[in-house]
Image (tube, rainbow, N blue to C red):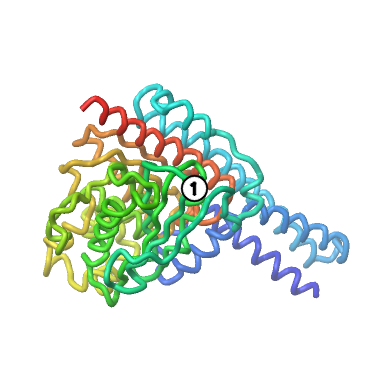
Amino acid sequence: MTTFYWVLTLLMGIATLTALIPGRALGWWVPLWFFVSTATNELAVWGLIMHLFMLAVGVGLFDPGEALIRGALCVLLLSCLGTLILIKRHFESGRQLERALKIGLPQNFEETIPFDRRRQLSHQITARDWLHPISFSRHGVRREKNIAYGDAGKRNLLDIFMPIRPGSDRPVLLQIHGGAWLVGKKEEQALPLMHHMASLGWVVVAINYRLSPRATFPDHIIDVKKAIAWIRENINNWGGNPDFITVTGGSAGGHLTALAAMSANFAPWQPGFEMVDTQVQAAMPLYGVYDFCNRAGIRQGTRIDDYVMKKVMKSTPDVDPDAFNLASPECWVDGEVPPLFIIHGSHDTLVWVEEARRFVAELSAVNSTPLVYAELHGAQHAFETVHSPRTSHYLNAAAWWLEWAYADWCAKRLQS
C-alpha cells in the first residue's frame, strides 16, 4: 500500500510537470504528453482538490516519518504548488484576452455594440461553469441534429444550436471541428462556445466534413464551403441571418477556418456551386496550422509534415507546390481578409505557437482589417474543450469580439 501511494503521487507530480513545461520535439511521445498535459492543465481546479485529498490520506493513514511516505508527501507538496501556478495562469488569461481586444480593435469598441446586446456580455467569470467541466447545456438553447448539407452521408451532416425563443435575422456562427483532418465529429468540440453563443441569441452551426485518409485535400475545405452555401440558402428557416456568417474552429478546424475566411469565392473549391457567395464576415481560428509548406522551418522538430504529406495531401511540396501553397492560409495574406481573432496557447505541444506568431506578423504587415491576436500563457492545444476558468474568460472574450464584428458589420451596411 505504501508503494502504491508513492507511485500514485509520483505520477501526479509528473502530470503536473507536463502541464507546466511545454513539450517540444518529443517524437512519438507528443500525443501522450499532449493528453496528460491538457487534462492536468484544464482540470487544474479539480487537480488541486485531488492533491489536498492525497495529502490528507498520506498524513492520516501512513507514518510521515517513513522515508517513502516522506518522499511522497514532498512530491505532493511540490505538485500542489505547481497546480496553484496552473490555476493562477487560468485567471490571468482574462487580462491577456482583454488586452488583445483593446490592442486589435478600434478604441471604445464596446460602445459599438447596441446596449440591448452589450448588457448580456461580461468580463467576469463565476464558478458555476468551471466547477462543472463537462456540463455544457445552457438554459433557453435547443439543438437540431443531423441535417444534411451535402451528399457525403454522415460526413455532410450538421447540427444547429439556437435560442428557444422565436426570432429572425440572428447572427450566425459556423463551427469546424479539429482532429488532424483525420478524426473528429461535430458533437465533440467547442460545446462551451456553441451553447454560450446560442444563449446570447446567435444561431450556431456545427458541421462534419470528409476526413482523410479517405478524403484528399481540398475535399475538407470544399465541404466547409458547401456548408457556407447551405447556410446562405437555408439558415433563415432557423432564424439566422444568411448575410452575416462568422466561422471558428480549432486545430485542423482552425486551419480550415482561416482558409475559408481568406479564400472566399475561390471557384476551384466550389465545384457545382461556383456562383454562390462563400465570403464570411469574420473568423476566429484557434491553435491552427497556417503553413503546410513549413517555410520558416518551425515544425522541424515535429512529425506533422510527414503526416500531412502522407495522409492529407497525398503528395509533397516538391511534386505539387501549388497545392501546398493553396492549402496554406499564409499564402493568402495578400487577398481580402475579414476581421480575425487568432488565439493560440504558449504551451501548445501539437502546433507550436511560433506558427501563429508568424501568421499574425505577415497579416499585420499587409492588411488593414482589424486583427486581434491573443497568446494565452500556459494554455495547451484544445484548451477550451472543457469548462475551466480559462475557458470562461475565453467565452467572454469570444462573445465580445463576435458581438463587435456583428455590430460593425451592421453599421457599415447601414452606411452603404
Picture layout, residue 263 above or below residue 211? above
- Seen at 54% across and 33% down, the residue is 123
Name the spot of residue 286 as percent of width and height, x first.
Answer: 39, 50
- Name the foreground residue: 108 vs 43: 108
- Seen at 28% across and 67% down, the residue is 150
Q: What element carries label 1?
A: strand
Picture layout, residue 127 above or below residue 149? above
Q: Which quadrant of the figure has residue 306?
A: bottom left
- Locate residue 379 relative to residue 363 in the image: left or right: right
For label 1, the residue is 163
Specify whether residue 303 is in view: no
Q: Which quadrant of the figure has residue 25?
A: bottom left
Task: State the count of labels.
Answer: 1
Name the spot of residue 136 as percent of width and height, x first.
Answer: 57, 55
- Check disc 1: other Cα within 10 Å, few if <14, some if 14-19, many if 20+: many
Looking at the rendering, in which quadrant would you find the N terminus? bottom right
Name the spot of residue 405 as percent of width and height, x first.
Answer: 35, 36
- Name the foreground residue: 165 vs 254: 165
Looking at the rendering, in which quadrant would you find the C terminus? top left
- Seen at 51% across and 54% down, the residue is 142
- Name the foreground residue: 288 vs 85: 288
Q: Which residue lies furthest to the bottom in this view?
A: 214
Name the spot of residue 67 as percent of width and height, x first.
Answer: 80, 65
- Locate residue 44 relative to residue 217 in the image: left or right: right
- Seen at 50% across and 43% down, the residue is 395
Specify whether residue 212 is in view: yes
- Locate residue 173 relative to residue 416 in the image: left or right: right
Instruction: Identify which amino acid the numbered label 1 is placed on.
Output: Pro
